[in-house]
Structures are given as structure tokens and as C-alpha cells.
Image (cartoon, grey):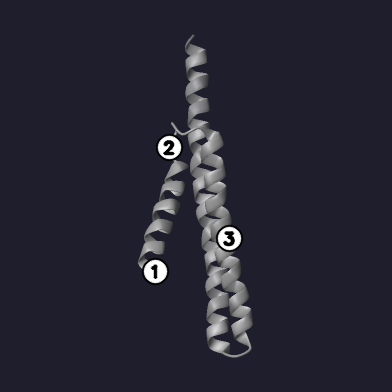
Amino acid sequence: MELLYEILLEIIFDSSISLDKLKKIPPFVKYPLVCLVILFFIGAIISLFIIGIIIFDTNIWLGTAMILFSIALIILSIMKYKQIYELKLKEMKKKERKKKKTEKKA
């Protein structure tokens, strides 16, 4: 049963994440699915942090490890988002330069 849930979630989230890269999918379908995936991951990270705080009273090492792990996930997520955003920004600037060059030639 656990394997079935894992397979279903993997199919849903992998397809939702790859939707962001496809250009043929309409935005009113693509953006809500991407937002849903982002909200799921934010919820999972926050729940790890809260569980770490709750467990901290009974087991200091495990609680600290979960809190540090959730903080590391937050930092890595922000770094990945920044990397993707900078890549898209560079692509947009390239398109603008090409557009200006074609306007100058015409």
C-alpha cells in the first residue's frame, strides 16, 4: 500500500514539476499545478520543523537534527529558486538583445 502511494505521488509531482518547463501547456493549467507542488513542499518542510520542535523535549539529538534538516531544506530551496530565476532572467535578456538587433537591422 505504501508503495502505491509513493508511485502515485511521484507521478503527480514529477509531472507537475516538469509542467513548468513545457511551453505548450496553457498558463491557467500550468501555474496552479506548480503552485500546488510548491505549497506541498513548503508544508512538508514546515511540518518537519514543527515535529523537530515537539521531539526536542524528549530526544534532544533527534529534535535538533530534524530542525537543522528542515532549515537546510529551506536554504537549499531558496538557493534553487534563485538559480532558476537567474537563468530565466538571462534568457529574457538574451531575447531582448536579439529583438533590439533585429530592430536595428530593419
Residue wearing tag 1: 2
Q: Amino acid at mark 2?
A: Leu
Q: Disc 1 vs disc 2: which is toward the camera?
A: 1
Mark 3 nearby-residue class (10 Å; few <14, some 14–19, many ≥20):
some
The percent coordinates of residue 105 (x first, y second) are 47, 11
Q: Is residue 30 above or below residue 60?
A: above
Residue at the (56%, 66%) spot, across then down: 45
Residue wearing tag 3: 42
The percent coordinates of residue 81 (x first, y second) are 53, 52
Q: Along the polypeptide, which appears first: circle 2 or circle 3?
A: 2
Helix, strand or loop for disc 2: loop
Q: Is residue 56 above or below residue 31?
A: below
Q: Nearer the viewer, residue 99 or 67?
A: 67
Q: Amino acid at mark 3?
A: Ile
Q: Nearer the viewer, residue 27 or 66?
A: 27
Measure the C-alpha gap from mark 1 to mark 2: 30 Å
The percent coordinates of residue 27 (x first, y second) are 54, 34
Residue wearing tag 2: 22
Residue at the (53%, 80%) spot, across then down: 65
Residue at the (57%, 48%) spot, across then down: 35
Which quarter of the picture shows residue 58?
A: bottom right
The percent coordinates of residue 24 (x first, y second) are 43, 31
